Image: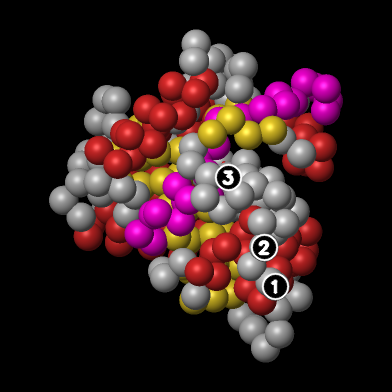
Amino acid sequence: MRIEVFADYDQMSAAAAALVERAVSAAERPVLGFATGATPIGLYRALVARHRAGALSFSRARSFNLDEYVGLPASHPQSYRSYMRENLFDAVDFAAGACRVPDGQADSLKAECEAYEAQIAAAGGIDLQVLGIGTNGHIGFNEPGTPFGTLTHVATLSERTRQSNAVYFAGVEAVPKRAISMGIRTIMNARRLVLLASGSSKAEAIRHTVSGPVTPEVPSSVLQLHPDLTLLLDRAAAAALDGVSA
Ligand code: F6R
């Protein structure tokens, strides 16, 4: 595990963009895994800026998102498809159909989960997966207690996660209760992982990720077992780590 600590969010985001850019140039048909939420917004802003400057093209790349709410149409403003369109997809040059987000309105959610895994495998696996982290250590929507062997599945959001995400909806009652999420094994199968965390609310989860026991009660703790993980943190998110400074 590599840990890099940055003075602020913008520097962390720039470092993440540099890693994505390297992954795009390193492969003939790069396969990227994306996350949503507040944390990677700066990363996507930096990637769009590089693209607009003529320095980065996604025309050969494909992508898979970590998750999507069940029951929201793709066009819903709070769907993760809408988030990705707004923050990245519509601003850069991915080929049509190159970006996959789970379909939270599929007739058969089970078939959609299986198809998602099959498509990741058919693409040759994910070269670089971007991750955020929940305050409870969730990755994707793999909440505490999710078995490490889980593949893409229908996940039930914890109350804590629904409360955290309520700011994006008209109150907690409007937050969907379920999501399709890559499983922990799906995430661990990616060749490279980069986890971003910003702010003091993530400090405890980061401490558990780095040095806590590896347990399904803290899903991110499994990342200790990944052979190629980079943690990009701002100072506040790194504050509970021993002996790490920016
Ligand atoms: C998003 C995702 C989640 C978030 C996590 C942190 O696709 O899978 O695990 O990464 O909830 O969210 P933020 O960045 O909003 O704190």
Q: Is residue 155 left or right of residue 184?
A: right
- Regarding mark 2 in the picture, which secondary structure is present there? loop
Q: Residues within 10 Å of mark 1 (few under 14, many from 20)?
A: some
Position in image of residue 208 (x %, y %): 70, 69
Residue positioned 58% across, 45% down in the render: 140
Measure the alpha-carbon separation of dots 1 and 3.
19 Å
Measure the alpha-carbon separation of dots 3 and 2.
16 Å
Please tell me the numbered disc located at residue 212. 1
Q: Which residue is mark 2?
A: 215
Residue 222 magenta-highlighted:
no
Respond yes or no on whether mark 3 lies under 8 Å from ligand 1.
yes
Position in image of residue 195 (x %, y %): 54, 60
Q: Amino acid at mark 2?
A: Thr
Q: Look at the image and give the residue range highlighted in magenta.
A: 170-192
Q: Residues within 10 Å of mark 3 (few under 14, many from 20)?
A: many
Residue 191 magenta-highlighted:
yes
